[in-house]
Image (cartoon, coloured by chain):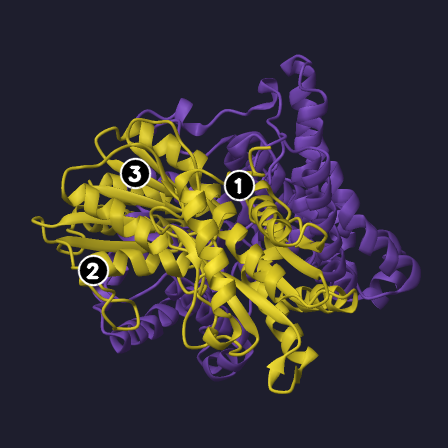
Chain colours: A purple, B yellow
Amino acid sequence: MKLLRELLFPTIAVIAAFLVGALLILAIGDSPVQAYKLLIGSALSWPDGIGYTLFYATPLIFTGLAVLVAFRCGLLNIGAEGQLYVAAFAAAWVGITFANRSAWILLPLCFLAPILAGGLWGAIPGVLKARFGSHEVINTIMLNFIAVALVSYFTQYHYRTPGDPIMETSEIGGGAHIARLGKFIPGMPERIPLNLAFILALVCCVLVYLFLWRTKWGYELRATGSNPSAAEYGGISIRKQIIVAMTISGALAGMVGINEVLGYRYRYYDGFSDNYGYTGIAVALLGRNHPVGVVLAALLFGVLQRGGIHVDGFSEHVTKDIVQVLQGIIILFVACEAFFRGSFGRFGLLRRSKV
Amino acid sequence: MKLAFWSALVVLCLLAVFGAACNRANYAADDKSKVHVGIVFDIGGKDDRSFNAAAFAGVKCAETGKSPDGTSCGKPALNVLVRDIEPGNPTSIEPAMRAFAERGYDLIIGVGFAQAPIMEQVAKEYPNIHFAIVDGVSNLPNVASLVFKEHEGSYLVGMLAAQASRTGTIGFLGGMDIGLIHRFEGGYEEGAKAVNPNIRIIQNYVGVTDSAWNNPGKGKELSLAQIGKGADVIFTAAGNSGLGAFDAVEQAGMQNGRATHFVIGVDSNQNMVKPGFVLTSMVKRVDNAVYAIVQDVVNHNFQAGFHVYGLDKDGVGYAVDDYNKSLLSPEMIKRVEEARSKIIAGQIKVTDKMLN
């Protein structure tokens, strides 16, 4: 029952957004039924639709989890974007530098590099906040710009194949490629970039859940988030919690690099991220800062991204911006939750459960 | 908890059934008698008023015989149906191309060199579909590479710049520091030196990442710096960032009703952006190239490989219209036209700095 109640509100928000979106599509002069058929039909078709939907959802699960962990500690990590850029480049750098080693050495190195790099990049604002009290929102945003500029510089001047007009590094060693799921699933061609990182994302969800709700460290972290003064009184070092939370958050965001570099392009490609870091905030918000919710929200956003292309191409007037409109309305509805809870609350329908 | 589990399961099943039902449903009812053309734009999107917009104008002209603004484009409408996708991010380019390919489109056009490797992958799997890549190169037997001799057009505007300059110093403002833009710069430099061997050319690039195409503020600062060093004509090849140079020359002002500093536009005709301050524009007729390839497919005349658009096929050139007529003297035009015929005849060879 508790889970149902948690799911109820985001579901209402999604349905309401689709209804408002339908009105907009009508106003533009297309049939909402046709447009939504295109949107959902193309996103759930086999194998391309489902493959790409899950592939698009993968980075959003990681960044959603990253935002979630920081949020549970009372921090807003806007820096997932920068963390995943640094991490993806780190993965590519290790993959290129040690390209000739055997897969047994190369793969673990390439696997750890983005996690460490993302964690380090996330720890910077954590340390700044813990040591000097400077606000993590400002610092993470500014570090995003630094991260993007830094990796662009290295890509452009040091790691690009000479003569390649595209801003990308050369390819990483073959040993570091991780398998695409098409290898294991009959009927799914291997060209679909859905890879083992998706499984890793699901594993991370379980781990984050266990860590936050089943361990002492997770308890300390959440205690800091819900009431820092009380937590400190209880003997928890808030400074340590802030740094730990930001490091874990950054490491989770960094795992996007595994999906992108080890599983998809096998190189660092400048501008690869479609605002994954920022969309992660929306995913965490819609997922009610719970790992299960994050997975569901990421899947929904994956559906929208996959379907958006087809709506753009094969409807008469609707463009892919309808996806952004839908996302925006969903967030709007979720964000004014308190307002709705007030009026629905008296029926006991949407009473906030204690998570 | 049990209830939650079962209801979640039911919802998932319903979704799956709905998805499967949608999957079988017809997509937009397309007219089978027409040739189907799908175009996938660059990250900039079809309304960038420059490169993508020109490609869009080309396919619109082929579909309706009209430019996107409703005026006639001067060519007949062909019997085609055009669908376009703006992927918006690099991950969506491949699914966009596949969406057209799966539906059996006759011609799929990719805009921008960044799409070339992706198009090669898709084109290999669909050998019976025609592909065309604008600005990119591929050797596959079903891909046409539409490339332009930007250096030839740049040579001509370089000559104009050198003739219009009173200070003996001119500027070049590039967008992203890549080979394609070096091609503009190289031609411009050679053209200017052909008129005045002692001319000084100042060059700056806005940046090294994709954002370099979309930073008019920095474009303006760089242009003002060039003006400070004495440049009085600035050629931009910087996409949206180039608009900053237009602001910079306007800020430099006028004397006796004539602008003291000029800018040269790029890709589309940008003469009307700041009338009186734009000496000319180096136009790249992506629309002509796209129209021609659509026409080839309609006439069952498609040829893979290079389709090179230079001065000879009106693929590149400089724009003269009511906005800049008074800025170009007949002697200037005469000299440039001579060079133009010499380039077409092969008597002048303009170096392609992208290859060197």
Give how far apart the Cα atoms at labels 3 and 1 are: 30 Å
Where does the C terminus of chain A fall, quadrant-wise?
bottom right
Q: Amino acid at mark 2?
A: Lys
Q: Dot 1, how many residues are within 10 Å of its Cα: few (below 14), some (14-19), or many (20+)?
A: many
Q: Is residue A264 visible?
A: yes
Tell me if A203 is positioned left or right of A38 in this view: right
Q: Which mark is residue B336?
A: none
Q: Which residue is mark 1?
A: B350
Give how far apart the Cα atoms at labels 2 and 3 are: 22 Å
Q: Which residue is mark 3?
A: B131
Q: Dot 3, how many residues are within 10 Å of its Cα: few (below 14), some (14-19), or many (20+)?
A: many
Residue A146's x, y, as percent? Answer: 75, 53
Instruction: Work out whether residue B279 or residue A129 is closer to the camera in this orientation and state it.
Output: B279
Give how far apart the Cα atoms at labels 2 and 1 are: 31 Å
Which element carries disc 3, helix, strand or loop?
A: strand
Q: Which residue is mark 2?
A: B75
Q: Chain of mark 1?
A: B
First of labels 2, 3 by sequence position: 2
Tell me if B301 is positioned left or right of A70 in this view: left
Q: Chain of mark 2?
A: B
First of labels 3, 1 by sequence position: 3
Residue B290's x, y, as percent? Answer: 30, 50
Q: Quadrant of residue B223?
A: bottom right
First of labels 2, 1 by sequence position: 2
Q: Is residue A289 visible?
A: no
Instruction: Work out whether residue B283 or residue B191 is closer to the camera in this orientation and state it.
Output: B191
Residue B337's x, y, as percent? Answer: 44, 56
Tell me if B176 is positioned left or right of A283 in this view: right
Labels 2 and 1 within one chain? yes
Which element carries disc 1, helix, strand or loop?
A: loop
Q: Dot 2, how many residues are within 10 Å of its Cα: few (below 14), some (14-19), or many (20+)?
A: some
